Image: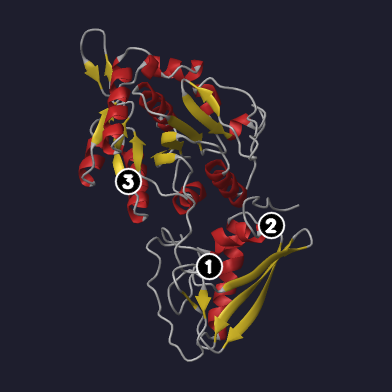
C-alpha cells in the first residue's frame, strides 16, 4: 500500500488530494483549485491508483488545464503519494457554482459567479476556508474554553520544554489544563511529563487522555513503542492531529496547550483549519538563525489570523559563579522579534541545568525553585491573564 489513508476523513482520498490541491492555483482566478471546488469525485482505484476529476469551465484553455494537471501531479508527489494519478477532465459551460457560505453550492445557468480573491497564504488554504470556498465548519472542542499553540520556526530551541512547563505552570495556578503533543515524528511528552501507558476509550468511543501533574496528556508516543520510528507521510500526520483534537475526551478544560512540531507545515495548517486558536506562543533562542525562523513562525500565525500572545527567548544567558552574566548564543534576538511585531517578550530563560534535568527526569522545572522556574511561572501567569482565565 503506497499511502496512509486518513481515518477521520469522510472520503479517505480527500486526505491525500487536499494538501496537494490547496497548493495549486487556478490561473484564471488565483484561487487554489481545492478551494475553488475544481477537484471532484476523488477516490482510490485498487491499491495504488488515485483518481479524481478536474472540473474546469469553457473560460479555461487547454494550456490552463495541462498546467493545473502537471502541478497537481507534482504536489501529490511532494506530499508523499507514490502511486499512479489519473486525472479526468470535465468542462462546464458556466463557471463553477458559488458557495453560499454554508457549505452548499447553488448553480444558476445565467448567473455571473463572484470571484473571490486569492488565498492570503501562498501554497496554503486560507484560514477558515473549506474545500469549496466557504467557511470550514470547525468543530468546537467540547468543554474546552481556550486552545493555544506553542511553536518555533526551527527545532532545538526548547519549544517542548516551554510547552510542558507552561501547561504545568497553568495547572499550578489552579486551572484545568490539557497538553497535546502534535510533534508526531518526535514525541517528547511521555518523557518530559513522566507518563507512560496506553490510553483507553470511554463508552462514547472517545480516547481518555493520560494524566500527569494534574495535566491531561495525549501523544503519539503513548500509541507506539519507544524505539519505533514513525515513518508517515503528510496526510497521515494531518489525520492524527485532527483525531487528537476531536476524538479525545479533553473536557472539562480551561486551556488546551498544543506543542507543535517545528516549522510551518501540515500540522500547523491542520490545526488552524480544525479549531479556533485563542493564540500562540513563539519560542526562540537569541542567535540570528533561530530568530529568522521565529519570524517565519510569527508571520505564519499572523497570516492565518491567530494572535501571538508573546515570545519566549530560551537559553538567553548563564549566570557565572562570580556574578558575571554570559550570553553564549548572542543577545537580544527575542526582544527584537517581540518589538518588530509589537507583542510581549514573555521571558528570557537562562541556560539552566535544572531545566535539562527536569526534562530528562520527567519533572518540569516549574515544580521546583530556580531562576528558570520563576521565569516560566511568569510566562504561565502572563498567558492566563491574556486568556482571561
- Residue at the disc numbered 1: 34
| In this view, 306 is above or below 76 | above
Residue 67 shown left or right of residue 146 in the figure: right
Residue visible at 41% across and 49% down in the picture: 276
Q: Residue furthest bottom?
A: 110
Q: Nearer the viewer, residue 218 or 299?
A: 218
- Compare residues 31 and 248 and report the one nearer the observer: 248
Place of residue 205 in the rendered image (x, y in percent of width and height, measured from the top left): 65, 40
Q: Which residue was labeled with disc 3? A: 295
Name which of mark 1 and mark 3 comes first in the sequence.
1
Asked if the residue under mark 3 is in contact with the one under mark 1, i.e. CB atoms within 8 Å, the reply is no
Q: Position of residue 32 (x, y in %)?
A: 48, 68
Local SS, label 1? loop
Residue 64 lies, in percent from the top left, at 53, 80
Q: For mark 2, give the secondary structure.
A: loop
Q: Which mark is residue 82?
A: 2
Q: Is residue 72 left or right of residue 290?
A: right
Q: Nearer the viewer, residue 84 or 328?
A: 84
Amino acid at each position: 500500500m503506497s499511502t496512509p489513508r486518513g481515518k477521520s476523513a469522510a472520503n479517505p482520498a480527500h486526505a491525500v488530494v487536499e494538501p496537494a490541491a490547496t497548493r495549486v492555483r487556478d490561473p484564471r482566478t488565483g484561487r487554489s483549485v481545492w478551494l475553488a471546488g475544481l477537484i471532484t469525485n476523488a477516490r482510490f482505484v485498487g491499491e495504488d491508483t488515485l483518481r479524481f476529476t478536474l472540473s474546469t469551465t469553457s473560460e479555461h484553455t487547454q494550456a490552463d488545464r495541462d498546467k493545473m494537471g502537471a502541478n497537481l501531479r507534482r504536489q501529490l508527489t511532494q506530499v508523499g503519494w507514490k502511486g499512479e494519478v489519473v486525472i479526468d477532465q470535465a468542462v462546464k459551460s458556466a463557471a463553477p457554482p458559488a458557495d453560499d457560505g454554508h457549505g452548499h453550492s447553488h448553480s444558476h445557468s445565467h448567473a455571473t459567479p463572484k470571484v473571490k480573491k486569492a488565498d492570503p497564504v501562498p501554497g496554503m488554504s486560507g484560514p477558515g476556508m473549506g474545500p469549496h470556498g466557504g467557511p470550514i465548519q470547525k468543530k468546537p472542542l467540547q468543554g474546552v474554553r481556550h486552545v493555544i499553540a506553542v511553536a518555533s520556526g526551527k527545532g532545538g530551541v526548547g519549544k517542548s520544554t516551554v510547552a510542558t512547563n507552561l501547561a504545568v505552570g497553568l495547572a499550578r495556578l489552579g486551572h484545568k489544563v490539557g497538553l497535546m503533543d502534535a510533534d508526531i515524528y518526535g514525541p517528547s511528552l511521555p518523557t518530559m511529563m513522566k507518563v507512560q501507558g496506553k490510553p483507553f476509550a470511554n463508552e462514547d468511543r472517545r480516547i481518555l487522555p493520560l494524566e500527569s501533574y494534574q495535566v491531561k496528556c495525549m501523544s503519539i508516543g503513548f500509541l507506539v513503542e519507544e524505539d519505533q520510528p514513525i515513518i508517515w507521510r503528510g496526510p497521515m500526520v494531518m489525520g492524527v492531529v485532527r483525531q487528537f483534537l476531536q476524538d479525545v475526551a479533553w473536557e472539562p478544560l480551561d486551556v488546551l496547550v498544543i506543542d507543535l512540531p517545528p516549522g510551518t507545515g501540515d500540522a500547523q495548517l491542520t490545526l488552524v483549519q480544525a479549531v479556533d486558536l485563542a493564540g500562540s506562543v513563539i519560542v526562540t533562542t537569541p542567535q540570528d538563525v533561530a530568530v529568522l525562523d521565529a519570524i517565519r513562525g510569527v508571520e505564519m500565525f499572523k497570516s492565518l489570523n491567530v494572535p501571538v500572545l508573546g515570545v519566549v527567548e530560551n537559553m538567553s544567558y548563564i549566570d557565572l559563579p562570580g556574578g558575571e552574566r554570559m550570553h553564549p548564543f548572542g543577545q537580544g534576538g527575542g526582544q527584537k522579534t517581540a518589538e518588530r511585531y509589537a507583542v510581549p517578550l514573555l521571558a528570557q530563560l537562562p541556560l539552566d541545568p535544572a531545566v535539562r534535568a527536569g526534562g530528562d527526569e520527567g519533572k518540569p522545572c516549574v515544580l521546583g525553585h530556580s531562576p528558570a522556574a520563576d521565569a516560566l511561572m511568569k510566562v504561565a501567569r502572563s498567558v492566563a491573564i491574556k486568556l482571561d482565565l
